Image (cartoon, rainbow, N blue to C red):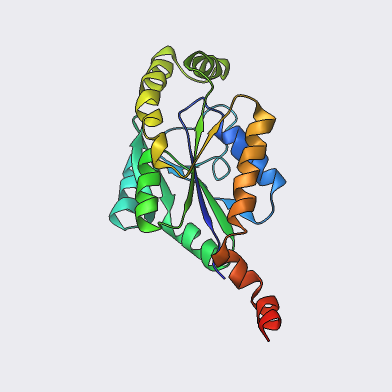
Amino acid sequence: MSGSLYIVAAPSGAGKSTLVNALLNRERGIKLSISYTSRGPRPGEQDGVHYHFVSSATFMEMVDRGEFFEYAIVHGDLKGTARSAVEQQLAQGVDVLLEIDYQGARLVRHLMPEAISIFILPPSREELERRLRSRAQDSEAVIKRRLNGSRAEIGHAHEFDYIIVNDDFERALEDLSTIVHASRLRQRVQSEHLKTLVDRLLS
């Protein structure tokens, strides 16, 4: 039985990573695919935990070898998902979550239309800016670039299967968990899980 693929995207500052980490702690059977990026680590980030940090040259060599499931330029940096890690885990029946941007999400949906896509919205532009500044990790120029870029990202929210507004964190987390629970009750998933029971009921 193959696993399900979840895509979670959001503009910077919407609280995507915090929500995803809380979901992974709550729900069993979901693994986060660690993306590759050409940017350097922020304070507190660890290689192989938050991202695989590589040089731009190394990243492009991986592109040339066809090693990425998807990749895109995000806020001036290269980011991508390794093909081998995703495909191997799905084949083993493990659910995989991709924390990517809308460009990468579009590519993944093209390759795997059955993927479940979720977009996280902030409650307001004021709150989005407050969250970006409260991280105290980026320069003023980077913050302004992320704020400007958020309009383009939010403009693609309608392309996703589900939209969650991260105003109240616990409620947003509950919404995210509900999507996972509902997706696991889909006919395709249940028919594989419950084949023996269905066969008995039909006999």
Q: Compare residues 143 and 182 and report the one nearer the observer.
A: 182
Q: Residue at x 47, y 33 (%)?
A: 10
Q: Measuring from the top left, give residue 119's x and y in whole percent.
A: 48, 37
Percent position of residue 141, x then y: 38, 15
Q: Is residue 132 visible?
A: yes
Q: Is residue 147 above or below residue 79?
A: above
Q: In front: 9, or 76?
A: 9
Q: Nearer the viewer, residue 6 or 190?
A: 190
Q: Is residue 94 left or right of residue 141?
A: right
Q: Is residue 12 above or below residue 101?
A: above
Left or right position of 180 against 111? right
Q: Residue furthest left?
A: 64
Displayed quadrant of residue 200: bottom right
Q: Tell me what residue is drawn at x 45 percent, y 58 percent.
A: 114
- Would you say residue 69 is visible in this rendering? no
**Residue lying at 65% horizontally and 25% vertically, measured from the top left:** 168
**Which residue is situated farthest in the bottom direction here?**
203
Q: Quadrant of the C terminus?
A: bottom right
Q: The N terminus is located in which quarter? A: bottom right
Give how far across and how far down residue 133 sits, in percent.
52, 15
Q: Is residue 133 above or below residue 88?
A: above
Identified at 39% across, 51% down, the residue is 108
Tell me where residue 4 appears, x and y as whole percent: 54, 58
